[in-house]
Amino acid sequence: MPIPKFTDLSLTLQIAVILVLGAALWAMTEYFYPNLGQVRAANAAKRAQVTQLTSEVAPLRPFRERVRALEADNKQLENQLANLKRIVPDEKEVDNFVRLLQTEAVTAGVQFRRVTAKAATTQQYYVEVPFEIELDGTYFDVLQFYDRLGRVERITNVSDLKMGGLQSGRTIQGAKKYDYAPSETVVAVCSVTTFFSREEQPETEPSAPAAPQRGRAPARPPARPLARPPARPAPAAAR
């Protein structure tokens, strides 16, 4: 059945259709207009937030372009820190240092007889840990040992070096008697000092100074010079 045209309807039906359409438009207006205002307000708030975030991020945009350079610099600093920890470790790795001495002695071809730990000395920024070592071998092998010891990564100082010949029968203070090989010619005794980073102590709150006695000025503590870490010696100095 075909739908009749609006003009073919009776006047009553035409008025009813107009009233229904008007009521529908009015209902749609009442429903959508408040929501449209809320949407506009939300959009305005979002635009304001975007503007604020853009202004906050703008100073950081140059760093985004330099992020690769910053990452490379950070990696380089981490490698430098790792190298410094190998040169001056944070912890007292005495066992590893003794193994280092033994390895260098075996590589140089000398007999590593003994190692004796001495009292450590605490400075302001580092700790000195000395050892007394005794070794023997040929003259050139002993020189090679000290040359190799001056080239290790860790800072190692050699002092109080005493050397004597086996054939001449010259005795060295602190040296013991061993069964020497026929090819060995010299005995050496010296002090080898390595260094460790000093752990930072927690700062304590200074206590209130005692009230000075009447008629006497409070005594001033003597000034102490700042200790500096020792410089790495040249290989020639180690010999």
Image: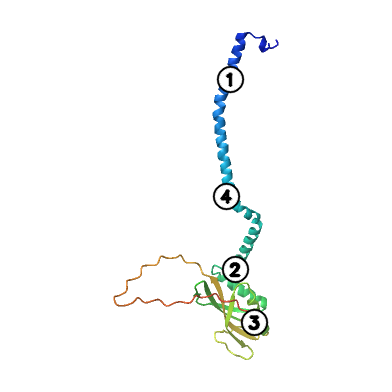
Question: Residue shown at 58%/70% (left/top)?
Answer: 96
As drawn, the label of residue 157 is none
Label 2, secondary structure: give it.
helix
Q: Is residue 10 above or below residue 21?
A: above
Q: Check disc 2 and report the residue beneath it.
A: 84
Q: Are marks 1 and 2 in contact (CB under 8 Å)?
A: no
In the rendered structure, which disc, 1 or 4, sits on the residue that comes first in sequence? 1
Question: Residue shown at 54%/33% (left/top)?
Answer: 38
Q: Residues within 10 Å of mark 3 (few under 14, many from 20)?
A: few
Q: Measure the alpha-carbon separation of dots 2 and 3.
A: 23 Å
Label 3, secondary structure: give it.
helix
State the image coordinates of residue 92 (x, y, percent, origin top left): 54, 69
State the image coordinates of residue 198 (x, y, percent, origin top left): 51, 69
Choose between 81 and 193: the one closer to the eye: 81
In the rendered structure, which disc, 2 or 4, sits on the residue that comes first in sequence? 4
Q: Measure the alpha-carbon separation of dots 2 and 4.
A: 39 Å
In the rendered structure, which disc, 4 or 3, sits on the residue that comes first in sequence? 4
Q: Check disc 1 and report the residue beneath it.
A: 24
In the rendered structure, which disc, 3 or 1, sits on the residue that comes first in sequence? 1
State the image coordinates of residue 232 (x, y, percent, origin top left): 60, 76
Q: Is residue 123 above or below residue 40?
A: below
Q: Residues within 10 Å of mark 1 (few under 14, many from 20)?
A: few
Q: Are marks 2 and 4 in contact (CB under 8 Å)?
A: no
Quadrant, the N terminus:
top right
* Residue 110 visible, this angle: no
* Quadrant position of residue 74: bottom right
State the image coordinates of residue 77 (x, y, percent, origin top left): 61, 63
Question: Residue shown at 64%/82% (left/top)?
Answer: 236
* Quadrant position of residue 109: bottom right
As drawn, the label of residue 236 is 3
Q: Residues within 10 Å of mark 4 (few under 14, many from 20)?
A: few
What residue type is disc 2 on?
Answer: Leu
